[in-house]
Image: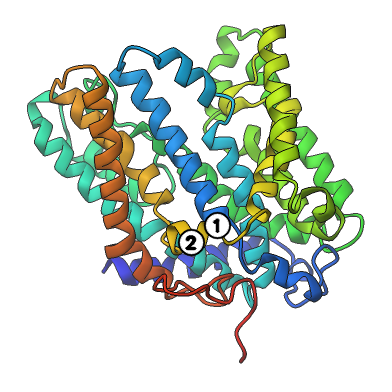
Amino acid sequence: MAMRLSNRIPDMLDTLFHMVVPRACRKFGERDIGLSDGLASDWRVNNFDMLRLLAALQVAVVHSLGILKPGYFTRLLGGGLDRFPGVPIFFVISGILISKSYENSDSLRDYLRNRCLRIFPGLWVCLVVSVLVILALGVGSLGRITAPDWLLWWAGQMSIFQNFQATFLMPLSTGLNRSLWTIPIELEFYIVLPALYGILRLRTRLGNMRVLAIALASLAVQLLIVNSHRSVGLVRVYSTLQVTLVPYLWMFLVGVSIQRNWSTVRGWLSGRAHWWGLGYLMLCAAAKWLRVDTGGNNMNPVYLLPLAGLIVSLAMSAPKLSHRILRHNDVSYGLYLYHMLVIDLLVGLAAPWGWASFAAAIIVSLGLAALSWILIEKHYLRGKRGALRAVSDGSSVPAAYVRPAR
């Protein structure tokens, strides 16, 4: 049943898209301005899998430090990790890879199908595990559960409203898997991207200016939310905007712009990770000296742009490193899905604060992420069509970012 539902979701999204976007905006097979066929080999092998894992690990470690409070060195470790916030890194990498995936797709349906296969199978299994965590904590630890509340929460978790927290979960001190608030934003990126390509005509040379205009508008909203005085009437508006793509779209578009203009920026990024790393560390040192906040998830563009350069440079410097270490096993998504559930369980069972609980949270989360990849995600990802990189068994580097012969 879950498989049939996951196959129907792209059809429903495709129908909705055709109702909103003019047909002239939906042309596949057009000549790309940013990436020519001759540059495809530059994208065949990269370190994005490892970088996504490090970003997910950063999120898991920061959450574990903040909730489990292991003690000594917590502030020092947390302060260092805050300079490399996982969520903005995820958004930039998504902009790069998802825009390339869209350009590589033969149809909108294939693109949406691939996105659904990437997100929903692992997410739905995580939902089942969430129910098991609730049972482990005891139904008595929750608020009053009614059938409508339960069904509404379940429907939200199954669709695109993972940031919805039902009232019966409020008695839990940490909620239940609240880190999933970024999943709806990621899904919104997936849905909006084809419209941006069509309406803004990103495949034309004026596309860069239009992307810049949208990115600046998104950044303006983020700065307004972060820095403005919040009157009583605006609190609800700002709270709603913060769980949508609006204040984060500019980060995603930074990745899209890098991908679209790779032939221009590659000389500044490929093989230059050491220089980008040194420059970014110097910038962070200056920020600490000047007592300037880099922003965390609401990252200041002065820091996000060089961090994006560093991330892409790391991906394209020694690009076989990720394959040698991970063998194309991508456990980053599973780690992001499960780490907060593990923390919620430890807190709910009154595990003592300290490094032992911290280590348990990270190790168990990595174990669940590996199981999610091996048992669920990898099998569904093999069903993707026109994927940038085929899912391999880890024994060799698969041909990536090249369409298979038809």
Residue 154, located in which quarter of the rendered image?
Answer: top left
Q: Is residue 223 left or right of residue 17?
A: right
Residue 205 at what x, y percent from top left?
Answer: 91, 59
The number of numbered discs placed on residues in the rendered structure image is 2
Q: Is residue 30 left or right of residue 105?
A: right
Q: Which mark is residue 278?
A: none
Q: Secondary structure at mark 1?
A: helix
| 1 and 2 marks in contact (CB < 8 Å) | yes
Q: Which residue is label 2 attached to?
A: 324
> Which color scheme did the rendering employ for the protein?
rainbow
Going 54% across and 65% down the picture, which residue do you hit? 112
Residue found at the far bottom of this picture: 406
Going 31% across and 16% down the picture, which residue do you hit? 69
The front one of 72 and 62 is 72
Q: Amino acid at mark 1?
A: Leu
Going 32% across and 38% down the picture, which residue do you hit? 339
Going 39% across and 57% down the picture, which residue do you hit? 120
Q: Amino acid at mark 2?
A: Arg
- Whether residue 98 is situated above or below residue 108 in the rendered picture: above
- Whether residue 149 is situated above or below residue 27 in the rendered picture: above
Examine the rendering and report whether any part of residue 143 can be seen.
no
**Inter-mark Cα distance, 1 to 2:** 5 Å
Q: Which residue is label 1 attached to?
A: 321
In which quadrant will I find the N terminus? bottom left
Other residues around mark 2 within 10 Å, as few (<14) / some (14–19) / many (≥20): few
Residue 280 at what x, y percent from top left?
Answer: 71, 30
In which quadrant will I find the C terminus? bottom right
